[in-house]
Image (tube, rainbow, N blue to C red):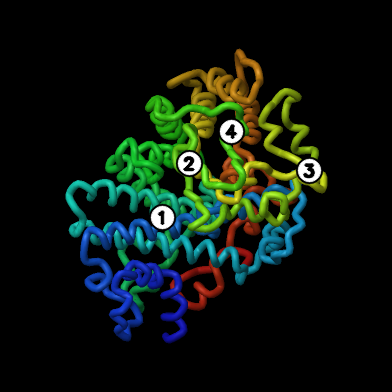
């Protein structure tokens, strides 16, 4: 039992301890801190919410890992990996072990942020009336997008067998304050975790304001719902959610394409007019987790990822999007989207909404908001390309691949939903699903390991 407490508190209890920073001199010999001690006022709840955002922004979650790691598993034909982190090399080789440190880090960071979100939700009675709806909406937004990502990475894809029986991750909706046998939560099904994410984001959509500086907003929740619905093949809801965001007229595509990824001498830059939700990065908070691996040493990165010429060959000759892939001082081709070491990590942006609406309308034979050709023309025009009178599904998917490359783990997630091979593996290979971390299996006897591990 001592071993179990030590491990499980790392995943859940640490987050609660962090919320009590304004009471750190009260050094009682607690193994976990009760809610009545840690969260007493509206300000305490606000601090906890900020802590949840900070956890969300860690390099293991939406600060980088949620996007980098699935892409490493699915880009064998378009990048060369020269990194020295063996656990990331396992992902490139599609030979992940159950003690992989990056797999473990994503799990722990995600559940730490979820626990802080749960603490916010459990203490809404202490929040000022004017802030209560916003705090609840932000906490549910954070929890919802994390559960979605966890389901994508640790569970089979929604279209692989039965989501009603395939296992994803444990669903925990209340703060973990005491570690005992009840803390051993089993894995929920893929369907259940997807539904929890949809429920949380729908609540957030209803609770959040239209504008909320760089914090989660109504449209941020709606945009993430569009992504989830597309991933599960619910095209009508995906189309409608994407159309709602576009029709809000709160966002606009920036030109040229490279301006969406500004690089002003390595300083923080605020979100662009295209960013619906982005993780904020400043010199005080740390660095862009994607910069570390994608950027060259010229731009403070490790230069671990080299883009092959065959990927550039996919772009049309006048496509300005190709300009984001630049050679460093050694003449090696890099992804330039993350050259700013303090650049925000874009979680979801307007271009994705046009692409989701176009694909969903195309599949459904509808033209809600715009025709698929009109939406693809919008994307192409920003890239310096001409209009199209008609499009096929293949045309739309190609634009999506070129527009969103390396931004959201889409190389893996799209391959799975489209049932395409990933390197030498079929889309439903167990090797394309993360293992449940070994330390969690050892700590929680209710957990079942994934196939192949």
Mark 4 = which residue? 259
Distance from disc 4 to disc 2, alpha carbons, whole Å, reads 12 Å
Return the disc, 3 or 1, that comes first in the chain's sequence.
1
Q: Is residue 438 above or below residue 125?
A: below
Assess whether mark 1 and mark 4 are in contact (beta carbons under 8 angstroms). Answer: no
Question: In front here: 425 or 36?
Answer: 36
Would residue 31 be found to the left or right of residue 303 on screen? left
Mark 3 = which residue? 308
Which residue sits at x=56%, y=35%? Answer: 260
Return the disc, 2 or 1, that comes first in the chain's sequence.
1
Q: In x, y percent, where is residue 216?
A: 38, 45
| Element assignment for label 3 | loop
Distance from disc 3 to disc 2, alpha carbons, whole Å, reads 31 Å
Which residue sits at x=64%, y=55%? Answer: 292
| Element assignment for label 4 | helix
Q: Is residue 74 above or below residue 170?
A: above
Residue 311 makes an appearance in the image = yes
At label 1, counting other C-alpha atoms closer than 10 Å, the crowd grade (few under 14, some 14-19, many 20 or more) is many
Distance from disc 4 to disc 3, alpha carbons, whole Å, reads 23 Å
Distance from disc 4 to disc 1, alpha carbons, whole Å, reads 26 Å
Mark 1 = which residue? 53
Mark 2 = which residue? 270
Of discs 3 and 2, which sits in the foreground?
2
Residue 233 makes an appearance in the image = no
């Amino acid at each position: 039992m001592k071993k179990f407490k030590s491990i499980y508190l790392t995943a859940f209890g640490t987050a609660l301890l962090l919320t009590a920073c304004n009471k750190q001199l009260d050094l009682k010999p607690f193994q976990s801190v009760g809610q009545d001690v840690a969260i007493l006022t509206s300000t305490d709840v606000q601090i906890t919410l900020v802590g949840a955002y900070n956890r969300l922004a860690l390099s293991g979650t939406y600060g980088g890992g949620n996007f980098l790691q699935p892409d490493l598993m699915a880009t064998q034909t378009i990048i060369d990996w020269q990194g020295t982190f063996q656990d990331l090399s396992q992902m490139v080789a599609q030979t992940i072990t159950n003690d992989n440190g990056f797999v473990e880090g994503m799990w722990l960071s995600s559940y730490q942020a979820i626990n802080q979100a749960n603490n916010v939700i459990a203490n809404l009675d202490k929040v000022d009336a004017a802030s209560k709806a916003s705090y609840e909406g932000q906490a549910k937004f954070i929890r919802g997008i994390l559960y979605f990502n966890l389901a994508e990475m640790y569970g089979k894809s929604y279209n692989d067998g039965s989501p009603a029986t395939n296992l994803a991750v444990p669903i925990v909706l209340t703060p973990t304050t005491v570690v005992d046998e009840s803390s051993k939560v089993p894995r929920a099904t893929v369907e259940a975790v997807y539904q929890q994410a949809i429920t949380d984001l729908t609540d957030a959509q209803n609770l959040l304001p239209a504008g909320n500086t760089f914090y989660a907003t109504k449209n941020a929740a709606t945009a993430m719902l569009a992504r989830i619905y597309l991933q599960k093949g619910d095209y009508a809801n995906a189309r409608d959610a994407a159309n709602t965001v576009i029709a809000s007229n709160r966002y606009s595509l920036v030109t040229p394409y490279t301006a969406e990824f500004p690089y002003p001498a390595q300083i923080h830059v605020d979100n662009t007019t295209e960013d619906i939700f982005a993780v904020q990065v400043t010199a005080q908070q740390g660095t862009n987790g994607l910069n570390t691996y994608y950027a060259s040493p010229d731009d403070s990165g490790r230069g671990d990822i080299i883009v092959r010429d065959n990927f550039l060959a996919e772009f049309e000759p006048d496509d300005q999007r190709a300009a984001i892939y630049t050679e460093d001082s050694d003449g090696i081709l890099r992804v330039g989207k993350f050259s700013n070491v303090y650049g925000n990590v874009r979680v979801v942006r307007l271009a994705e909404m046009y692409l989701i609406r176009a694909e969903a309308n195309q599949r459904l034979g509808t033209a809600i908001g715009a025709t698929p050709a009109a939406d693809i023309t919008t994307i192409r025009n920003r890239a310096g390309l001409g209009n199209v009178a008609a499009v096929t599904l293949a045309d739309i998917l190609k634009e999506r691949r070129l527009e969103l490359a390396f931004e959201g783990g889409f190389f893996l997630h799209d391959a799975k939903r489209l049932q395409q091979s990933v390197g030498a593996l079929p889309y439903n290979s167990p090797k394309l699903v993360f293992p449940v971390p070994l330390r969690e299996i050892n700590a929680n006897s209710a957990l079942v390991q994934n196939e192949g591990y």
